Amino acid sequence: MASLDRVKVLVLGDSGVGKSSLVHLLCQNQVLGNPSWTVGCSVDVRVQDYKEGTPEEKTYYIELWDVGGSVGSASSVKSTRAVFYNSVNGIILVHDLTNKKSSQNLYRWSLEALNKDSSPTGVIVSNGDYDREQFAENPVPLLLIGTKFDQIPETKRTEVLTRTAFLSEDFNAEEINLDCTNPRYLAAGTSNAVKLSRFFDKVIEKRYFTRDPSQMTGFTDRKRFNFKSLHYD
């Protein structure tokens, strides 16, 4: 069997948000029975049928790089983690819907990866202080995934989903909210499954079919991303 072309997708977010469980669900279509802390980086592979059902259909490998650690890590840890940020074709940003801080920290995770030579530490961003236009110009596809949807009380869901909608707009990314212990959230034909497939197709499109050579190897040579204004919380 001929080897398949592949793309590299980072999976970023705070420790404990469920990145390992999510990656296992995406790649194995099974619930991870006994999740553990990720040290360094763990890589799993998903098979994606690009443009499934069309004459252009082709199968690719999606490498999902689950990066461990915290945005509050020491600079030496961040320097080590920067190795994983090379030649990336897409980013999945993961947050815990029951933990507002994990959502706020996605801004810092994104900047750490996009500006892998900088260290945006100690900064919390609120709505209005984030430059959305920067991500409108970002050539690397992003997807926002909220976990532990099942743990949100019914009385809080509207508030939480409104907050995630702001995040989605800030990152110029589609959002998926799910429970990693329930495969039905990603069942074939669901809106979540459609969004996921659309994201992976976009990653493949950017990597293999873009006419701009600067976009074909991830964001290594892109302009640096900065906050328009920052404040400390």
Image (cartoon, rainbow, N blue to C red):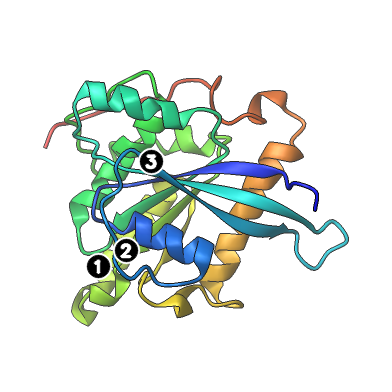
* Distance (Cα) linking label 2 and label 3: 32 Å
* Distance (Cα) linking label 1 and label 3: 33 Å
Q: Are marks 1 and 2 in contact (CB under 8 Å)?
A: yes
Q: Nearer the viewer, mark 2 or mark 3?
A: 3
**What amino acid type is highlighted by mark number 3?**
Cys
Which is nearer the N-term, disc 2 or disc 3? 3
Which sits in the foreground, 127 or 139? 139
The residue beneath circle 2 is 162
Which sits in the foreground, 88 or 121? 88
Q: Is residue 144 visible?
A: yes
Instruction: Kindly give the residue lying farthest to the left in the view shown.
Output: 233
- Residue at left offset 19%, top offset 34%: 72
- Residue at left offset 23%, top offset 74%: 151
* Distance (Cα) linking label 1 and label 2: 5 Å
- Residue at left offset 32%, top offset 44%: 106
**Image disc number at residue 41:** 3
Q: Is residue 114 visible?
A: no
Vertical position of residue 210 compared to residue 25: above or below:
above
Label 3 element class: strand
| Horizontal and vertical percent position of residue 176 | 44, 64
Label 1 element class: helix
The residue beneath circle 1 is 159
**What amino acid type is highlighted by mark number 2?**
Thr
Which sits in the foreground, 83 or 174? 83
